[in-house]
Image: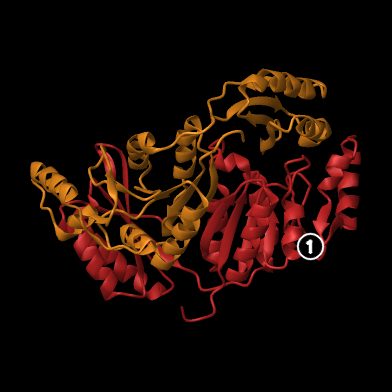
Chain colours: A orange, B red
Amino acid sequence: MARNQPTAAVLLIGDELLSGRTRDINLQQIAQYLAPLGIPVRESRTVPDVEAEIVAAVNELRVKYTYVFTTGGIGPTHDDITADAIAAAFGVGISEHPETTAMLAARYAAMNTEYTPARRRMARLPHGSSPIANPVSGAPGFQTGNVFTLAGVPQVARAMLEDVGPRLETGAVVHKVTIRGVGLREGDIAEPLGALAKEIPDVAFGSYPWFRSLGDNGVHLVASTIREDLVEEVAAKLEAIIAETGVRPERLEDANS
Amino acid sequence: MARNQPTAAVLLIGDELLSGRTRDINLQQIAQYLAPLGIPVRESRTVPDVEAEIVAAVNELRVKYTYVFTTGGIGPTHDDITADAIAAAFGVGISEHPETTAMLAARYAAMNTEYTPARRRMARLPHGSSPIANPVSGAPGFQTGNVFTLAGVPQVARAMLEDVGPRLETGAVVHKVTIRGVGLREGDIAEPLGALAKEIPDVAFGSYPWFRSLGDNGVHLVASTIREDLVEEVAAKLEAIIAETGVRPERLEDANS
């Protein structure tokens, strides 16, 4: 890429994601939030609620990518160990953050709810961290160096991203176009698509088949590039490749992700 | 755990999972398939369609876990590089597997479809691999040592698991029970839940809040254990913890996952 491009990794924390109980959506929504900022997600990992596993993953990822986003494990219960793990990963202490605990105390007082030791755990931040606002349920996330620790509840994680965005260095935005062929088979377009990918190395071409049932199957062809000037040209070429097979190409509306 | 417990890792391969285009479901369905076999998934990673990234992840995971399941990148197009990456990870060659290419040739002949060089790519297996049957669309996955390479299309990946299951050493099944409290807040049950977790170390307790909107929020408490004899006891204790707050506990039907 032409300019210095920031990159990101996403670390999903939680036994429930590995047991099959919960289907993650945070990777997708973080990637979709970062795409228009020109920050591609390059890797994701999912680890259980085990401190050593979290620490190892954080320390591998934070030196390899510009930014790391973690989700999960910052609530008040015994299995919420992410804050301690981040502190351990950075080799710093952890204690109640004065402004955060004052904010939570006032919030619970307004709800006539006791500010218990368990709830106070949510005010503990690794030393050197700054809070990330949580307009949904109060208890903040936090930024520690280049690591952003978000909630696991998708609605809360999404809201926290709004407070993270302004802190990020942006990069070149990747523009995308998607052309769909209903009933198309990948084998019908593999050769000309591969030739096109070689011909235009500034564009990444992806081929994504779907198969829900006979008749509800086909292929999405996706072109991705930071060269906005190439988008219309490659869209036309993908349409021609699909049309050549006798299938009608359909261009889909596409956001930056 | 009392007996030798097999473990698994899942490696999800594909740019589309990191760009935000596609929300993965393969981790969940693989975990749900393995749970009744007593094979817990301990880690998952998502990497782009970049050979060096795939090779590095496969080689880290295959020594750390009993089994590795990969998804994605085994179609006929230029971005389908998983088979080559697996061969590189194992340091073996790759070429057309005779039985597989004969099967595909016959399949395409029956469809009056040309068996092109692109389609022949799907018959290439790393040396020493055995195919994994694909009853949906023909082109097989493959097993290389303890690594099982599945398709990315969820319906195909799911079908392939049926051919993988009989090859796996099974372990002790984890039994689960889930009790829900609608409107419950984690802070209301954190102390007694933490005490219960300390009291019964043979059971893992998870607390999973949801928050879709005010009124559509609450907490799921999940107990997981290979000690089936403990399930009813801990279910009653979780119900009592929730009832103590004034919220009505609801026990959910739960499979082994």
Which of the image's four quarters has the C terminus of chain A? top right
Decide if residue B237 is on the left or right side of residue B74. Answer: left
Q: Position of residue B11 (x, y in %)?
A: 60, 55
Which amino acid type is shown beneath numbered disc 1? Ser
Which of the image's four quarters has the N terminus of chain A? top right
Q: How many marks?
A: 1
Callout 1 environment at 10 Å: few (<14), some (14 to 19), or many (20+)?
A: some
Mark 1 falls within which chain? Answer: B
Helix, strand or loop status at disc 1: strand
Residue picked out by circle 1: B130
User: Is B64 or A230 nearer to us in this picture?
Assistant: A230
Q: Is residue B116 above or below residue A129?
A: above
Q: Position of residue A247 (x, y in %)?
A: 77, 22
Q: Residue at x 75, y 59 (%)?
A: B88
Can residue B124 be seen here? yes
Q: Position of residue B149 (x, y in %)?
A: 69, 56
User: Is A235 or B113 nearer to us in this picture?
Assistant: A235
Residue A182 image-quadrant placement: top right
Q: Is residue A52 above or below residue B94?
A: below
Decide if residue A101 is on the left or right side of residue B221. Answer: left
Q: Is residue A9 above or below residue B98?
A: above
Q: Position of residue A152 (x, y in %)?
A: 37, 48
Q: Residue at x 30, y 68 (%)?
A: B234
User: Is B69 or A142 nearer to us in this picture?
Assistant: A142
Residue B62 image-quadrant placement: bottom right
